[in-house]
Structure formats: structure tokens, C-alpha cells
Amino acid sequence: MPVIPRVPTGPGVRQPATPGRPGTATPGRPAARPARPPGPPAIPNIATRELPGLPQLPKLTPPPSWQDPNPPPPKPAPPPPPPPPSTDNANAVEVSGVVRVGNDILVIVKAPNEPTSRYIRVGQRIAGGQVLVKRVDFKSGADPVVVLEENGVEVAKAVGEKAPNVAQKPV
């Protein structure tokens, strides 16, 4: 069992304060008051002084414009325009005739790489879907002209016009 030391008692020995009770008073003496904290110190009244004037900054000349010793590389030349789209298949089409039956217009054509000619209507495609029969222009006193379109380029072919002798592309 632990040993608890004895607290000395007797005249002139003060007892420690018990929690919840202010300091114990000795008989015949009033209880001691806790000391007050000191108030803020007084600020001395000193006359204010002005700061001496600041000197003017010297006027600086602007620095000379800086130039990079390494000039930027020249801009590359724009690429050349692409070649015009090919119209070889439309140029190779042979138009044998134009027939009007009621409201329908039929065109007799022979497409390149096809063995025979055939009837087609305006709006249909030939030569493996690469050439569109766009319209037929009827001019008074002249043969009709069939307008074909390949790669967005129109090619006009008169009835009976033969295809030029050029190497044909396989379709």
C-alpha cells in the first residue's frame, strides 16, 4: 500500500486552498484579496513631427528598343492548290441519243468499261456510280446537250459526240 506523506500543521503553516472555497482566513485576520492586474500604461503626449520631404527620382530615358539577334524563321510557303478533280469517266461517256416519252426523258449512253449502251433517266448514276446524269438542255434548232457531273464538275456532251481517246481508269 502506498505511503501518503503527512502535511505539516501548526501555527504559521498555511493550509492549501480547498477547491470551491476561496483562500482560508486565519482567525482574527481578514481574507486576502486577489491582486488586480495593472491598467494600461499612460501614453505620453509627444508633439508629432513631419517627415522630411523625399527627394525626386531622377528622370530616366526609356531603354532602346530591344531587337532579337536571331530573327524569326520565314513563314513556310502555302502548299500548292490541289489538282482539279478528275472527270475522266464523264469525258469517256458516249451519248447516242435522247428520247422524250411523255414527261420522261431517256438518254442513251455508253459508259466507259461497259460493253453496251443503255437507257437511263436524268438523276441516275453510271460508270460505277461515279458519274451523275444531271440534266438535258434542249435548245431550239440544235441537238440536245446532256450535262454529266463527276466529282462536282459538270461536263457537257452533245448527242453523237465521241469520247476522246484517253486511257480510261478501271471502275
Image (cartoon, rainbow, N blue to C red):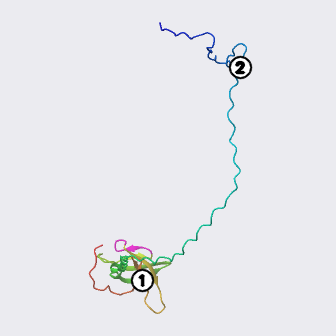
> In the rendered structure, which amino acid carries the disc numbered 1?
Val
Of residue 75 and residue 73, the one placed in the foreground of this image is 73
Q: Is residue 15 above or below residue 131?
A: above
- For the question of whether residue 110 can be seen, the reply is no
> In the rendered structure, which amino acid carries the disc numbered 2?
Ala
Helix, strand or loop at label 2? It is loop
Res. 31 mark: 2
| Left or right of residue 59, residue 112 in this image | left
**Residue located beneath label 1 in the image:** 146
- Span colored in magenta: 123-129
Quarter-of-image position of residue 149: bottom left
Residue 103, image x and y in percent? 50, 78
- Outermost residue, left side: 167
Q: Residue at x 42, y 83 (%)?
A: 146
| Left or right of residue 21, residue 56 in this image | left
Residue 47, image x and y in percent? 70, 55
Q: Answer few, some or many: residues within 10 Å of disc 1's Cα (few below 14, many 20 plus, some between 14 and 19).
A: many
